[in-house]
Amino acid sequence: MYIDQSYRTVAGTAFYNRLEELRMLIDKVRKCSFTIIWGPRNVGKSELLRYLVNKFKGENWFTTYIDIREVEAKYSISIDFEKVGRKLLNTLANLVELGKFIDLLERGFEVSKILRANGFLVILDEAHLIEKPRVILEALIKRCLYVHRDRPVSVIVATSEGHFVLSDEVRILKSYGAVDILIDHLDYEHFKAFTEEYVELKSIALEVSVDELYYELCGGIPGAFIALTSQGVKRWIKDRRVELLRAISLIAKELKVKREAILEFIAQLPIKIDPSDLTSQPTLISQRLMIENIVFYDPSELPSIVKPQMPIYVKLAEST
C-alpha cells in the first residue's frame, strides 16, 4: 500500500494509492509531454494532480495548476509565490482569467528560465470547460511538443467528462502525440484505509459496512463516499436513482429505444465492446451514458470495457 501521511488532501486525509499512476505521470512530465488524464468524477484526479505539483516543486520545477471550474483566477491558479513575486503572480493570474493559456505557457516558460528551474509544468483541470477547447488545446500541444526544446515543458489536461475523452478534440491531440491515462477507482484496501481515517477525522459513524460501501454503493470513489456521509445513505441512494432514471429517459428519447433496453445494458455492466464500432446499439448507449457520468470506458485492453461509475447504478438498474 502507498499512503503518504506527510501530505494532506483537501478532505484533510493522507494521500492514498495512485503510485502506478504517479510513476507514469512523473515519467511523462520529465520527458516533455502532453498528457490527458481522465476517469470517473470524484475519483481523485484533482488530488493526484495537486500531489504531482508538490512532487515537482521539490525537484525545482516551475509549476502552475489551474482549475477551470473556478471563476476567479486568484483562486484557481496555484504557483510558487515566494519564488515568483506578487507582480508576476498577478500577471499570470490575469492571463488565466482572460483564458490566454498560450500566453500563460510562453510567459511561464520564460519565468522557468529566469528561475533556472529544471522544467515547466502546466496543469489544466476540468479542461472540457475551456471555451473553444479544440483551438486552445491544439495550440498548446504544438507549443509544448514542437517549439520549446532547451528545457522540459509539459502540459497535463484533466477531465471527468466521458464524452470529452471520445471527442474529436482528444482524437486530434493524440494524433499530435498526446498520451492518455485513466485514473480508475481506489482498490479495496486503500479505500478502506481512507474511509477509516475520514470517519475518525470527522467524528462520524458509518451507517453501512465498508464492504457494502465498496461493492454495492460508491465503489472506490473517495468523493462519492464523502457525499454519502454528508447526505446519509438513504438520501444518497434516492438521489442516485433520480439521477439514473433522468439520464435513461433522456437517452431513450434521443435514441428512440425502450428504457428497459438501457436498464438491461447497465444491469449487465461491466461489458466488453468495440469502441470503433459506432453502429452497435450498446456502443451508442454507452457513449451517451458517459455524457451523463453513469458509465466510463477502460481502454487498457481491446475490446474496451464499459464500467459503471459506481456499483449503485448497476444495483438500481437491476432492481428497476
Image (cartoon, helix red, strand yellow):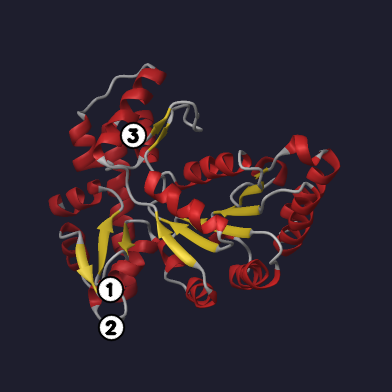
Question: In the displayed structure, does residue 189 sit left or right of residue 50?
Answer: left
Circle 3 Cα neighbour tier, 10 Å, few/some/many (<14 / 14–19 / ≥20): many
Label 1 belongs to which residue? 283
Marks 1 and 2: CB-CB under 8 Å? yes
Tell me if label 3 and label 2 are in contact, CB under 8 Å.
no
Q: Is residue 111 above or below residue 276?
A: above
Residue 299, x across and y down, in percent: 32, 66
User: Residue 30 versus residue 53: which sits nearer the camera?
Assistant: 30
Query: Is residue 248 something one can see in this rendering?
Result: yes
For marks 1 and 2, give the CA distance: 7 Å
Q: Amino acid at mark 1?
A: Thr
The image quadrant that residue 238 belongs to is top left
The reply to whether residue 157 is in sight is no
Amino acid type shown at disc 3: Leu
Compared with 202, 106 (above or below) is: below
Q: Please state if 106 lies on the left or on the right of 3 as rendered.
A: right
Q: Residue at x 24, y 25 (%)?
A: 207
Residue drawn where x is 37% and y is 56% of the image: 293
Q: Position of residue 306 (x, y in %)?
A: 26, 63
> Label 3 belongs to which residue?
228
**How busy is the neighbourhood of tag 2: few (under 14 within 10 Å), some, or many (20 plus)?**
few
Query: Where 129 sits versus 60, above or below?
Result: below
Q: Name the one closer to the observer, 138 or 307.
A: 138
Give whichever of discs 3 and 2 has the lower sequence position. 3
> Regarding mark 1 in the picture, which secondary structure is present there?
helix
Q: Amino acid at mark 2?
A: Thr
> Which residue position holds label 2?
279
Query: How far apart are labels 3 and 2 at the CA level?
Result: 37 Å
Residue at figure coordinates x 18%, y 68% from the top left? 261
Q: Nearer the viewer, residue 59 or 88?
A: 59
Number of numbered markers: 3
Secondary structure of the residue carrying tag 2 is loop
